[in-house]
Image (spheres, rainbow, N blue to C red):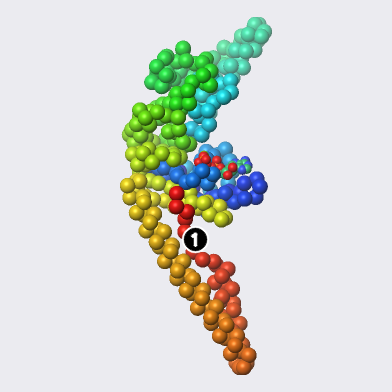
Amino acid sequence: MTHLNIADVDYFLPDGRQLLSGVSFRVGNGAKTALIGPNGTGKTTLLRIIAGDVVADEGAVTRSGTLGVMRQFVGQVRDESTVRDLLLSVSPARIRDAALALDTAENAMIERDEESTQMKYSHALADWADVGGYETEDFWDKVTTAALGVPYDRAKWRAANSLSGGEQKRLVLEALFAGPDDALLLDEPDNYLDVPGKRWLEKTISESSKVVLFVSHDRELIANAATHIVTLEPGISGATSWTHGAGLASYHQAREDRNARFEELRRRWDEEHAKLRALVLRLREKAKFNDGVAARYHASQTRLAKFEEAGPPEAIPLQQ
Ligand SMILES: Nc1ncnc2c1ncn2[C@@H]1O[C@H](COP(=O)(O)OP(=O)(O)OP(=O)(O)O)[C@@H](O)[C@H]1O
Ligand SMILES: [Mg+2]
């Protein structure tokens, strides 16, 4: 069984600002989980922590099964990379490594066509075959045909930046969903997709047997594809997480109930606080005239200090 477990993750930005505070949730059992929250709350950073690109300051990420990752920049590729590079970027490490070795050996042979470079090239080709490179190319042929309408042989050297944002996304999504990974992390997969593309994505996420964690700002995609919703809520000392174990249809009611509970807790805290302060003042006055009250006065001061130190219940999350 595939799962991702995020436990008590804290993360601080280089400038010392706390971005994530005690973020915890679990994704498993074929769940399709949407990760939502306002711009800049740390969704991309959290996905990068889960993917292992960034190390959390506290907490742990554990998982079972293999992970495929689509990063937020897909759709905005501006560099020299090709369609093949884009497909390699979402391939298992053994495929990426073998492809790199093959390119290096090929370039060396073009520069100096002699026995030693030819030998290295034929070794690299054999390694490519061993890791399943040719099967992968057959698979990529299906992917480029589905995403771009052309076979892999015609698409592979095309500059990725000559594809539209939507075509780049579609290519990577086709490769990930049809590929071997058990769990997928998708950062704004719907970005740049047109309406038919979004419908395709909703259906693909819903029907996939993989565990999917996706970031989105698109209500419809969340409504039609998410079985669970994790909200990152900005707070003074970093964003906290809140998990809704169902889809968007019941989300708003759950959120209102939760906010109402917070309001109730906060109201009780304020009442208790006022009572404790009144008690301290009363005992202070009494202690002026009665030495026997001094110990009770000090005890009440300690209680108030502890109460204030523990602080009020978590702030009411901002409405989005
Ligand atoms: N290396 C860094 N140095 C300084 N600040 C950073 C760094 N990386 C991220 N940030 C800041 O951390 C915050 C969270 O960024 P992140 O990209 O995770 O947000 P997000 O929730 O994905 O936002 P969006 O919805 O816009 O994609 C932002 O304020 C960003 O400017
Ligand atoms: Mg982001």
User: Badge 1 local density, few (<14 within 10 Å), some, or many (20+)?
Assistant: few
Amino acid type shown at disc 1: Glu
Q: Is residue 40 left or right of residue 136?
A: right
> Quarter-wise, where is residue 199 in the image?
top left
| Residue at position x 34%, y 36% in the image | 206
> Quarter-wise, where is residue 99 in the image?
top right
Q: Residue furthest front?
A: 319
Which residue is under mark 1?
A: 314
Tally the marks: 1
Q: In this view of the protein, can residue 249 be seen by the observer?
A: yes
| Residue at position x 33%, y 50% in the image | 250
Q: Secondary structure at mark 1?
A: loop
Image coordinates for residue 137, horizontal then vertical, percent? 45, 18
Q: Residue furthest top?
A: 114
Q: In this view of the protein, can residue 172 be seen by the observer?
A: no
- 62 and 271: which one is in front? 271
Image coordinates for residue 147, horizontal then vertical, percent? 41, 22
| Residue at position x 59%, y 73% in the image | 305
Q: Is residue 222 left or right of residue 128?
A: left
Figure check: 318 above or below 291? above
Q: Is residue 109 left or right of residue 229?
A: right
Image coordinates for residue 29, horizontal then vertical, percent? 37, 43
- 41 and 185: which one is in front? 41
Image coordinates for residue 314, horizontal then vertical, percent? 49, 61
